[in-house]
Amino acid sequence: MTLALALRDRGKSTEMLDELLAAVKAFPEDHQFRMTLAQTLADRGLDDEAIAQFREMIRLWPNLPDPYNNLASLLARNGQDDEAVFLLRRALQIDPAYTEARTNLETLTKDRPGSPGSR
């Protein structure tokens, strides 16, 4: 991952993505490589590809809360609020102290009918 981050810092994002894809392929059991890949894809606006990576993380590591939160953020950005709420609630089931997921859930539900804080 050090090479990928060095490439990112030098502005070589295409090479960085290639390195991350190679790392995910070489070390499929390492969730950090896949997380970095998914976040990089999301940062580049490649939402469909990032969503696929986060879904794969959830399939492979269902007890990690971060992929649920990150996938929820992407889905909410794309107007899929109901699924995003479900995923954020799942992240909080896994880790009730996950502040970022709680904040995202509150933000997403504050104006929804029937939710706390709605009008």
Image (cartoon, rainbow, N blue to C red):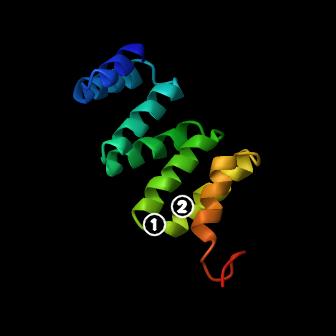
Q: Which residue is mark 2?
A: 84
Task: Tell me which residue sits at (34%, 50%) in the image.
Answer: 47
Looking at the rendered structure, the secondary structure element under dot 2 is: helix
Task: Tell me which residue sits at (57%, 66%) in the image.
Answer: 108
User: Is mark 1 in CB contact (under 8 Å) with mark 2?
Assistant: yes
Residue 15: percent from the left, percent from the top?
24, 23
Task: Tell me which residue sits at (41%, 14%) in the image.
Answer: 2
Seen in the picture, residue 17 relative to 102 is either above or below; the reply is above
Q: Is residue 20 left or right of residue 11?
A: right
Q: Quadrant of the N terminus?
A: top left
Label 1 – label 2 distance at C-alpha: 6 Å
Numbered label attached to residue 80? 1
Residue lying at the far right of the rendered structure: 96
Q: Residues within 10 Å of mark 2 (few under 14, many from 20)?
A: many
Residue 50 location, quadrant: top left
Task: Tell me which residue sits at (33%, 45%) in the image.
Answer: 49
Residue 45: percent from the left, percent from the top?
31, 48
